[in-house]
């Protein structure tokens, strides 16, 4: 079994330091689905900063052998207008294609969901590309159900437990 170490991004300096690696991961992760990924380095840069600033305590890195293999950008208090409540939002999860299928994505989802529950959320949500069948299956296996469709995006949600309405 591969040893996966999860680390939270603690400071803006740390984020800035790992940014170039996160950019590479974004490009690698979406190789098969460029329409759902970022177009160029400038867009990747802007997108990653947006992700970090949206919730600076919601970014987690997964290391394998000292190398960042994947990351998740989550938000602990995101307004879900479709259901009229704050949810924990998975804004982005990306795993370097060299490390797909060894459990990195699963660990990152677990960490984000724990973060949401610690923050008092009872529901997790995300948008996924409607043709991204691999990712949709991945989420369904982890308890997410299909909800709204908006353009090329499918909304999925998972009930995390606890009292509804938080
Ligand atoms: C979706 C994604 C995050 C999953 O990450 P991962 O680290 O491969 O996930 P895991 O290894 O925990 O699980 C992948 C599942 O696919 C299976 N699998 C086997 N070989 C695989 C491979 N080569 N690639 C991907 N998955 C594989 C795993 O066994 C596992 O099956 P399970 O669902 O029955 O447990 C990753 O594929 C990815 O970065 N995709 C591109 C970016 C993306 O689409 N992000 C989601 C946007 S909303």
Image: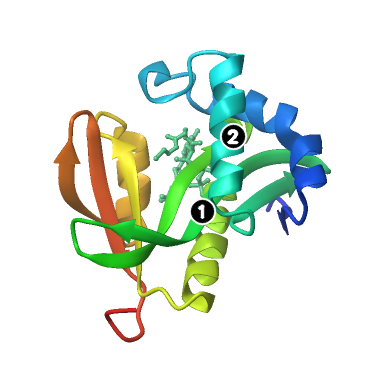
The image position of residue 27, as x and y in percent, is 56, 21
Quadrant housing residue 121: bottom left
Image disc number at residue 131: none
Type of colouring: rainbow
Check the image and report above or below for 96 versus 12. Answer: above
The image position of residue 31, as x and y in percent, is 49, 19
Secondary structure found at label 1: strand
The image position of residue 19, as x and y in percent, is 72, 33
Taking the image as drawn, is residue 72 in sight? no
- Residue at (55%, 38%) from the top-left corner? 50
Image disc number at residue 74: 1
Check the image and report above or below for 140 versus 47. Answer: below
Q: Is residue 163 left or right of residue 40?
A: left
Secondary structure found at label 2: helix
Q: Are marks 2 and 1 in contact (CB under 8 Å)?
A: no
The image position of residue 112, as x and y in percent, is 53, 61
Q: Residues within 10 Å of mark 1 (few under 14, many from 20)?
A: many
Taking the image as drawn, is residue 106 in sight? yes
* Of the pair 6 and 98, the residue shown nearer to us: 6
Name of the residue lying farthest toward the bottom: 163
Q: Alpha carbon of mark 2 to alpha carbon of mark 1: how far?
A: 12 Å
* Of the pair 129 and 164, the residue shown nearer to us: 164
* Of the pair 88 and 35, the residue shown nearer to us: 88
Report which residue position mark 2 lands on.
48
Quadrant location of the C terminus? bottom left
- Residue at (27%, 79%) from the top-left corner? 165
């Amino acid at each position: 079994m591969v040893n996966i170490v999860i680390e939270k991004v603690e400071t803006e300096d740390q984020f800035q330091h790992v940014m170039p690696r996160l950019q590479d991961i974004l490009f690698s992760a979406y190789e098969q689905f460029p329409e759902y990924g970022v177009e160029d380095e400038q867009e990747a840069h802007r997108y990653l900063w947006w992700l970090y600033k949206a919730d600076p305590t919601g970014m987690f890195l997964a290391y394998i052998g000292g190398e960042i293999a994947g990351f998740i950008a989550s938000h602990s208090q995101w307004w879900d207008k479709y259901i009229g409540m704050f949810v924990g939002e998975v804004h982005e999860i990306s795993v370097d294609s060299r490390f797909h299928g060894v459990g990195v994505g699963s660990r990152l989802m677990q960490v984000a969901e724990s973060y949401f529950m610690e923050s008092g959320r009872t529901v997790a949500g995300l948008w996924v590309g409607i043709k991204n069948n691999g990712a949709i299956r991945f989420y369904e296996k982890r308890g997410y159900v299909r909800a709204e469709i908006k353009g090329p995006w499918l909304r999925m949600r998972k009930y995390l437990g606890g009292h509804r309405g938080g």
